[in-house]
Image (cartoon, rainbow, N blue to C red):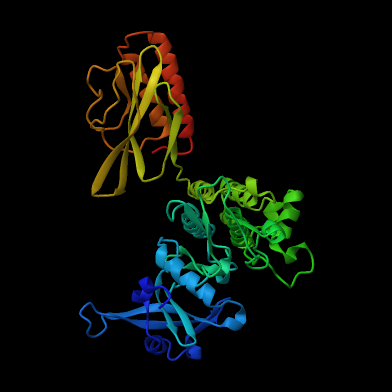
Amino acid sequence: MSKIPELDHLKVSLDHIKLATNNFADHNFLGTGGFGRVYIGQLPVPSSSGGEPAGTVKVAVKRLDEKLGQGEHQFLTEVVMLASYKHANLVTLIGFTDEGVEKIIVYKHEAHGSLDKHLENKDLTWLQRLRVCLGAARGLAYLHSGVGAGHRVLHCDIKSSNILLDENWEAKISDFGLAKIGPTNQPFTFLVTNACGTFGYVDPQYVKTGVLTKESDVYSFGVVLFEVLCGRLAFDGKYEDERRFLVGWVKHHEGSRTLDQIVFPSLREQMKPNSLKAFFRIALQCLNETKKYRPTMKSIVQELEIAIQLQTNIIGTTLWGSLAGGEPWSIRLESHLKLRKIFIDHQSFIYSIAFVIEDISNDSVHSFQQYGGAMGPSGYTISQCDPLVSYNIGHGKPCYCLAHNPNRLPLVPDKFIPFTRDISKMNLRHGVEDSFLKTKYFLTLISIACSNGYY
């Protein structure tokens, strides 16, 4: 791409693409999108020595057809975006061709195709659908807040046909031709543009005002969430009533408090009620007509994680602490994190609390991290200690371990409460009764947080 020499290393020769797709043969044809026709192929992988190819990679080849409304600008935008930003939930760019009139983008092929093809798939379970939504949300959250300092990417065309699924049903956001880059160093990020997007998904406030914000992507993502839940597309022309447009159908049932009736029938028996409630809550927020009441993509990720945990009964633990004389803080423990110790720094009242957490995501490597703790009554900061050996962190500070789990067994609520008995054995310097009551109350808060599953 002579206009952007930094991308020349991604060029793929047109001859190689023709060879990979059997010269764009009909039996290699996958479908047509807003950019043009898409083909599947096997592209040779160059060897490091420059000799015979090292093998082939299965690719999806997107061939621009300007008669469909997109052109060189969208081609350049997509190549630059995918070359610049990498994430597990974005499609992988293999390369591109810009020879003569041909403008072609080459991606890694995703085995299960686009999400829209699976909305009515009765074999796609509720849990799988939740995980697809979570993956797509993570990809979009990265675009909104993870691409780098001072800017964000607004996708502008979020829809189920632009979410691809790999062999493990992991979601990958695709089609960046309409994407825009906006600033993040302002209270509100907005761009004034000619309205773009897809009918049925586009934010009505964006259509009305021409003002594009990250919340416009959030609205579109909310439509996708309901597509996944209802097993249908955003627009269905076979209906002549409120069912014709998915958002109108959702609003109709929200008003009559009959949202459970729109759930895809094959999913109803699989769903845990609290998981469905969590999903409804965040999906409806996305469709709020007032932009400022729509959630961020980071919030959507967190809520979808909760919906999955409620569906699987794998509930993360939330721990609270407070810096001495400072603001409270909290940390959520997911299923791969285990609480190993709790330390409290106190005299007649609690100054600070610290937790030692073990990461067991890798069976052969156990890493520990301390959260919380601060300047206590003795003027020291709680320090890291061996979480499986020591009951006291030393240095003569009145800090005590209230939960000790030397056998690395998961803690559960009925095993957690007896640990409070350790308090009665403490040799507290001041206000034994007062400290006992305050400490017991604090542990009660922790046990409530763990009531649905404790790790």
Q: Name the residue nearer the viewer: 276 or 87.
A: 87
Q: Is residue 257 above or below residue 382?
A: below
Q: Quadrant of the C terminus?
A: top left
Q: Name the residue nearer the viewer: 1 or 426.
A: 1
Percent x, y of residue 302: 50, 47
Percent x, y of residue 54: 26, 80
Q: Is residue 205 above or below residue 122?
A: above
Q: Is residue 331 above or below residue 277?
A: above
Percent x, y of residue 100: 46, 88
Which residue is most to the front? 3
Q: Name the residue nearer the viewer: 294 or 361.
A: 294
The image quarter containing residue 65 is bottom right
Q: Residue at x 53, y 73 (%)?
A: 74
Q: Is residue 6 above or below residue 223?
A: below
258 sits to left or right of 418: right
Q: How many marks?
A: 0
455 sits to left or right of 381: right
